[in-house]
Amino acid sequence: MSIGEHLRGLGGLPAYQFPDPAKDVDAQAVALSRLPAADGVAWRISADPYDAEETWPEAFGRFLDTVDPAQVRAIIVGSWADAYDNRPDDVIDAIITAREQLPALRALFVGDIIGEECEISWINQGEVTRLLDAFPQLEEFGVRGGERLEFPAVRHENLRTLKVQAGGLPVAVVRGVAASELPSLRDLELWLGTSEYGGDADVTDLAPILAGDQLPSLKRLALRNSEIQDAVCAAVASAPVVARLDALDLSMGVLTDDGAAALLGGQPLTHLKSLDLHHNYVSKEIGARLADTLTAAGVELNLDTDDAYSDEDDDGSVWRFVSVGE
């Protein structure tokens, strides 16, 4: 499945698309007169992915000249030209260059690109941690796309939410996140993906995250969209970090009875406020056991199979799929 809609918001603010340049001067004046307050929305800035009249940095420059950048609290980086071929290095450079103009920026997402613009596993990325270094007050950061993504280990004092979405997350990225020191982080979400699209991490690479030593404030852990979801569940079942979580999300992957049974046989999960397992291949019997154990304890449990489907070859081989792949 592809991602079919853009982010609806970021940093607690609704998303708002910064308008393209209008050819008609009067139409442009009307569009600009209707802009919301600079601090009232998360500004999505994008360039046409195939036939852009301006580059993303040019659109961003026009944005900085139009609104009061000192009031801007959230920016969503939409499509840039030929994201299936081009890294967003000039996008990252443009944002970093403007950092003195953006003192109030607290939320940033790079790559709010949907399937019709570029499939998630085709999106080229860059060294996004440069943005974390440039904005030490940033509280929420997200990125979509794993191709050529770089995430060397960082230390960031104020980051509270980190989301990395991919059809396949490279092991170097997983290890970089796992080695990062993020003392204020409360919400970590990784889409591990599949080996077909570059997701070559295994559960041993998640060990520092599951130990939780460098994530003392973590309250929500989401390890999603993985073809090794059963192995992830088995590791989570005995992970020290789980005891202090409010929310655990193991959804969107190839979760079968093996992984669900590991959760049932591991440490108690009844302290959780929510456990999200949607898009799964769990039998009704095991699902009922999970519900009996957790729902009765007040845990909000999501066992919706969603759009999970499987194929069977003539030789009896069964193929199961993550929620978001190509």
Image (spheres, grey):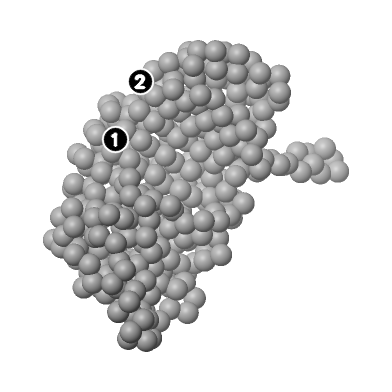
Q: Closest to the observer: 64 or 37?
A: 37
Can you tell which quarter of the image residue 285 is in? Answer: top right
Residue type, label 2: Arg
- Quote the CA–CA distance across marks 1 and 2: 13 Å
Would residue 120 be seen by someone viewing this image from the given angle? Answer: no
Q: Closest to the observer: 72 or 156?
A: 72
Q: Closest to the observer: 89 or 4?
A: 4
Q: Closest to the observer: 56 or 212?
A: 56
Would residue 7 be seen by someone viewing this image from the given angle? Answer: yes
Task: Quickly name the residue at label 1.
Answer: 185
**Which SS class for mark 1?**
loop
Can you tell which quarter of the image residue 207 is in? Answer: top left
**Residue lying at 29% horizontally and 73% vertically, measured from the top left:** 32
Rendered-image quadrant of the C terminus: bottom right
Residue 14 image point, x, y percent = 37, 52
**Residue lying at 42% horizontally and 39% vertically, measured from the top left:** 189
**Residue lying at 43% horizontally and 27% vertically, measured from the top left:** 247
Residue type, label 1: Leu
Compared to residue 124, the image places residue 24 above or below, namely below
Residue density around tag 2, few if under 14, some if 14–19, many if 20 or more, within 10 Å: some
Compared to residue 240, the image places residue 133 above or below, namely below
Instruction: Please give left or right for residue 51 compared with residue 93 in the image.
Output: right
Task: Quickly name the residue at label 2.
Answer: 244
